[in-house]
Image: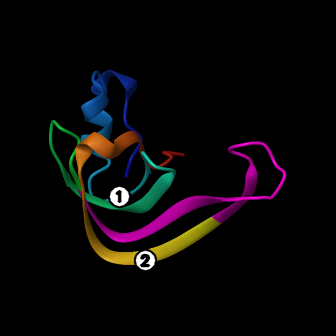
Amino acid sequence: MADVPSQGVQEPFDLIRLSLSERVFVKLRGDRQLTGVLHAYDGHMNLIMSDVEETIMIVEPVEGAPEGEGIVRAVKRNLDMLFVRGDGVILVSPPSRT
């Protein structure tokens, strides 16, 4: 996609609109992250994505360690198509436009 002049982006949803059919990064509640191709979105930030890689960060407690500390393990899975409910979305990052 060609460089987008900054005057064309006036609202956050403009960046999302310009990222349709491109690979985006999505951070979700519950220590989950998605990377995939964005196909659709709405005003509630519900997303439809394809070719998705989901990464879940799991903290395994270590005996004797303070609460909330431990070994962090990343579990990954691939999905062909995914509907993401908007109330779980924290951040959507468009592809870099270099």
In the figure, is residue 85 to the left or right of 29? Answer: left
Viewer-side residue, 4 vs 10? 10
Q: Residue at x 31, y 27 (%)?
A: 9
Write down the region rendered in magenta: 48-73
Residue position marked by numbered label 2 in the rendering: 78
In the figure, is residue 48 to the left or right of 2? Answer: left
Q: Relative to 15, does residue 20 appear above or below in the rendering?
A: below
Is residue 66 magenta-colored?
yes
Mark 1–mark 2 distance (CA, rounded to whole Å): 17 Å
Residue 1: give x, y in percent of width and height.
37, 52
Q: Quadrant of residue 81?
A: bottom left
Q: Residue at x 27, y 67 (%)?
A: 82
What amino acid does circle 2 point to?
Answer: Asn
What amino acid does circle 1 point to?
Answer: Glu
Q: Relative to 39, does residue 19 appear above or below in the rendering?
A: above
In the figure, is residue 96 to the left or right of 84? Answer: right
Residue position marked by numbered label 1 in the rendering: 22
Viewer-side label of 1, 2: 2
Q: How is the image coloured?
A: rainbow
Residue 94: give x, y in percent of width and height.
42, 45
Callout 1: 10 Å neighbours few (<14), some, many (20+)? Answer: some
Q: Secondary structure at mark 1?
A: loop
Viewer-side residue, 44 vs 39? 44
